[in-house]
Image: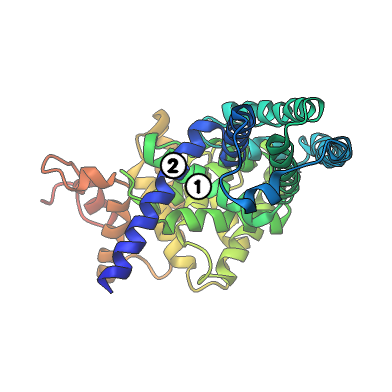
């Protein structure tokens, strides 16, 4: 077992080193191409005898073979160019609201890597012509294998860029990295949230899946993961309402979203629906935003969680009463929500209310001895008097 663990550890270190080299060298295919060019040209220039007979069998060529081999390599190169031309024709197509070119260019040093690959691919052609003209047998053989590798790489790149699984993984990976670094959602997820067709439930379910994967990642964030999922769902809802700019249509879309979430409770993070509710409350007095009571009546009339969602909305309203200098408007909203809670709030709801209340704070703040939880306002929400301590 110890020996196996050592081997696994060594393998992980080697993989890490190779990954770093690939990132710095423009990607694995570009790095391999540059190494093959340099080494094959050097060995051809040395003009030494082959070390092993087997190597001579692989690399040795008769002079009349070079033109035929060069033609064959050029044909493979032309197939690779066909793949590139096809790819350039679809780079502006969208998958889940994201352009394919944006998917390809995600990650650190993406543009540099792409340029390195382009230069390496063209350099292979130039070196191949040199090898044919001057009968360099090692170089021409290596060029043959590398052109086959390039052709396979371009085919894989096209299939990968259009793969649903690849897109999901890249969106999640970039979002997790950005959230870990600076708390931002990531470029791909931002584009997806802004550009998906909001009335297409299949597309929306894909983004719900991504929210769930972000919430389940093992990476450590400064903020609570459920809070992050809640905020992402709120941004999605906000962008949707602004883009639709129609109260009735927005109400219909939100109703479908919550219905999907309620039907698939085990599949989706429950904080997605809470994020939707919070976004509606934040924009409750915008002309494009549906009334919160209409949302509950339309979406969760028969749901067991209807009361919990209303309590969440009520607690959030109390918590954000001073937001955007609209205290009097939020105060009116809390009155409406209180009337909707059936049965009314009671002592049994205290633990749930406190859980909701503390979920609005940053995770780091909860470990600080100076955090102010504003418990007086929570006490008032629970029915206590302001004069009671």
Q: Nearer the viewer, residue 299 or 233?
A: 233
The answer to whether residue 351 is above or below residue 182 is: below
Report x, y in % for residue 187: 56, 35
Q: Residue at x 63, y 52 (%)?
A: 53
Q: Assign a secondary structure to mark 1.
A: helix
Q: In the picture provided, is 143 more to the left or to the right than 205?
A: right
Q: Nearer the viewer, residue 323 or 213?
A: 213
Q: Read off the residue under disc 1.
A: 173
Q: In the picture provided, is 68 more to the left or to the right than 227?
A: right
Report x, y in % for residue 368: 15, 43
The answer to whether residue 242 is above or below residue 340 is: above
Q: Nearer the viewer, residue 204 or 186?
A: 186
Q: Residue at x 73, y 51 (%)?
A: 159
Colour pattern of the rendering = rainbow
Q: Residue at x 58, y 37 (%)?
A: 106
Q: Read off the residue under disc 2.
A: 177
């Amino acid at each position: 077992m110890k020996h196996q663990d050592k081997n696994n550890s060594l393998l992980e270190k080697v993989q890490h080193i190779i990954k770093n080299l690939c990132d710095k060298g423009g990607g694995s295919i570009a790095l391999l191409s540059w190494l093959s060019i340099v080494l094959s040209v050097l060995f051809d220039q040395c003009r030494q005898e082959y070390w092993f007979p087997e190597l001579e069998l692989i690399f040795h060529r008769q002079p009349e073979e070079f033109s035929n081999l060069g033609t064959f390599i050029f044909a493979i190169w032309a197939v690779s160019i066909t793949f590139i031309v096809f790819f350039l024709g679809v780079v502006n197509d969208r998958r889940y609201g994201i352009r394919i070119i944006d998917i390809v260019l995600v990650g650190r040093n993406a543009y540099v890597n792409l340029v390195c690959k382009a230069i390496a691919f063209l350099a292979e052609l130039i070196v191949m012509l040199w090898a044919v003209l001057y009968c360099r047998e090692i170089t021409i053989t290596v060029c043959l294998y590398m052109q086959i590798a390039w052709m396979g790489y371009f085919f894989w790149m096209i299939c990968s860029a259009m793969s649903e699984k690849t897109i999901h993984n890249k969106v999640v990976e970039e979002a997790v990295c950005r959230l870990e670094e600076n708390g931002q959602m990531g470029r791909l997820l931002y584009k997806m949230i802004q550009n998906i067709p909001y009335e297409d439930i299949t597309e929306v379910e894909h983004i719900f899946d991504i929210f769930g994967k972000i919430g389940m990642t093992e990476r450590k964030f400064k903020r609570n993961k459920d809070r992050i999922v809640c905020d992402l769902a709120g941004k999605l809802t906000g962008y949707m309402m602004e883009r639709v700019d129609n109260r009735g249509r927005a109400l219909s879309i939100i109703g479908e979203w919550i219905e999907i979430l309620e039907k698939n409770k085990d599949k989706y993070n429950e904080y997605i629906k809470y994020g939707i509710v919070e976004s509606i409350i934040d924009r409750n007095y915008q002309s494009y935003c549906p009334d919160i009571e209409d949302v509950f009546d339309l979406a969760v009339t028969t749901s067991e969680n209807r009361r919990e969602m209303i309590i969440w909305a009520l607690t959030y309203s109390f918590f954000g009463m001073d937001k955007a200098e609209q205290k009097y408007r939020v105060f009116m909203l809390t009155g409406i929500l209180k009337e909707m809670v059936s049965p009314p709030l009671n002592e049994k709801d205290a633990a749930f209310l406190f859980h909701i209340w503390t979920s609005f704070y940053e995770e780091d703040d909860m470990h600080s001895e100076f955090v102010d939880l504003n418990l007086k306002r929570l006490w008032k929400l629970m029915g206590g008097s302001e004069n009671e301590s």
